[in-house]
């Protein structure tokens, strides 16, 4: 199924739409046909009254941390709470990170100070309109030039 990035008149990413009928990459109309675009821009500005924060999800955490373990830098396979929930840590952007299985298992419910470990990057909530799309984990390389000015550079670096 083809997916298309929808941009506001200001080039701000609004979302992703799909070809519902899955008819391939060609759209047919009364007087001809046209290739399905990967990016479309609205002619008129659409006001977004309330911007929701980026939902905390496994996929979004992996996108924020670049798919790498924040403890050792290897490929991440799980998520970990920096301050363990058993010790009062919350399930929020500032406390949840991507981790490899080895580090997550070794850390268990211990605080970082007890192990002498340090984070490679500080966890924080992602900002920017592009994160609504990046957090889904299903982006296309053709969209990156449109997403980078709105916060995608941090996720793709």
Image: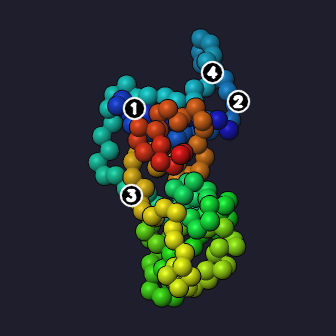
Looking at the image, which residue is at 48% across and 88% down? 87
Which quarter of the figure has residue 100?
Answer: bottom right
Quarter the N terminus occupies: top right
Rendered image: mark on residue 24: 2
Circle 4 residue:
35
Mark 2 or 4 closer to N-term? 2
Asked which secondary structure carries label 2, the reply is loop
Of marks 2 and 3, the one in the foreground:
3
Compute the Cα span from label 2 to label 3: 34 Å
Asked if the residue under mark 2 is in contact with the one under mark 1, i.e. CB atoms within 8 Å, the reply is no
Mark 1 or 2 closer to N-term? 1
Looking at the image, which residue is at 62% across and 65% down? 72
Q: Position of residue 136 (x, y in %)?
A: 56, 52
Circle 3 residue:
53
Q: Position of residue 109 (x, y in %)?
A: 57, 85
Q: Position of residue 76 (x, y in %)?
A: 65, 62
Looking at the image, which residue is at 39% across and 52% down? 127
The answer to whether 65 appears left or right of 44 in the picture is right
> Residue 84, can we see it?
no
Mark 1 or 3 closer to N-term? 1
Asked if the residue under mark 4 is in contact with the one under mark 2, i.e. CB atoms within 8 Å, the reply is no
Q: Residues within 10 Å of mark 3 (few under 14, many from 20)?
A: few
Of marks 1 and 2, the one in the foreground:
1
Could you say which is closer to the camera, residue 134 or residue 118?
118
Q: Residues within 10 Å of mark 4 (few under 14, many from 20)?
A: few
């Amino acid at each position: 199924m083809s997916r298309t990035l929808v941009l506001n008149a200001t080039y701000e990413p609004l979302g992703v739409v799909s070809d519902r009928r899955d008819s391939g990459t060609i759209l047919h109309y009364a007087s001809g046909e046209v290739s399905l675009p990967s990016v479309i821009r609205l002619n008129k500005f659409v006001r977004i009254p309330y911007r929701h924060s980026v939902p905390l999800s496994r996929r979004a955490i992996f996108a924020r941390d670049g798919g790498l373990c924040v403890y050792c830098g290897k490929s991440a396979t799980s998520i970990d709470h920096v301050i363990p929930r058993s010790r009062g840590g919350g399930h929020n952007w500032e406390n949840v990170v991507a981790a490899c299985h080895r580090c997550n298992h070794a850390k268990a419910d211990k605080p970082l100070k007890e192990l002498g470990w340090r984070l490679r990057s500080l966890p924080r909530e992602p900002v920017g309109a592009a994160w609504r799309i990046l957090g889904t984990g299903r982006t296309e390389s053709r969209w990156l030039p449109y997403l980078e000015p709105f916060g995608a550079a941090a996720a793709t670096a």
